[in-house]
Amino acid sequence: MNMCKLLVISDSHGYSNFARKAIKKEYPFDILVHCGDVQGSISSIVDDELSYDVRVVRGNCDFGNNLPKEEEFKAGFIKVWLTHGNDYNVKYEEDLKTLKTAAIRNNADLVLFGHSHFAEIVRDEETGIFFVNPGSICYPQVSGDKATYAVITVTDDYDIIPEIKEVEDN
């Protein structure tokens, strides 16, 4: 059985409170993914008493750490490519053209990214690749919006089921 559940957060910018709420609400899951701009240590977010994999990349505000800029890993049967997104113009291209080109080059089935603080799920019609930005777990792009994260289920039938959720009680 290769079904896999991912909890995806991004842009926590030193605040672990909402991330820890999301972990508590969504557990159990298999992989915690942070799409960058941790601004501190990922250990302030991770709950050591719970069992899950952790994948994290460096964002444009993550200085003085040795996190990778990008990472690839398997979630169930699918290939996931993780990047913060700042090197791929995600704030400035509505069609995510630069990110899409890189995703194809990396043979990704699912691309996880952050940077824009804007939560979105896009499935590219041409390639079938899913692009998921969980938004910001602490600083949403639009004032008045709630902090967001993503939950992605990868089924044994190769289905990718992404959803954006709001952190309660911000």
Image (spheres, rainbow, N blue to C red):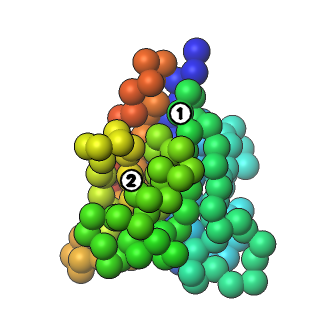
Q: How far apart are marks 2 and 1 (CA)?
A: 14 Å
Q: Nearer the viewer, residue 70 or 20?
A: 70
Residue appearing at x 34%, y 39% in the figure: 128
Left or right of 83, for residue 72: right
For the point 24% across and 77% down, which residue is it?
A: 142
What residue did someone put label 2 on?
Answer: 132
Residue under label 1, please give it: 78
Does residue 155 appear anywhere in the picture? Answer: yes
x and y, in percent, of residue 153 in the image = 43, 33
Q: Which amino acid does label 1 sit on?
A: Ile
Q: Which of 146 and 130 is in front in this view?
A: 130
Residue 124, numbered circle: none
Say which quarter of the image contains residue 159. top left
Side (left or right) of 13 relative to 138: right
- Residue 27 visible in the current orientation: no
Classify mark 2: helix, strand or loop: strand
Residue drawn at point x = 58 percent, y = 15 percent: 1
- Label 1 element class: strand
Which amino acid type corresponds to the residue marked 2 in the rendered image?
Answer: Val
**Residue 116 % position (x, y):** 38, 74
Q: How crowded is mark 1: few (under 14 residues within 10 Å), some or many (20 or more)?
A: some
160 relative to 78 in the view: left or right: left
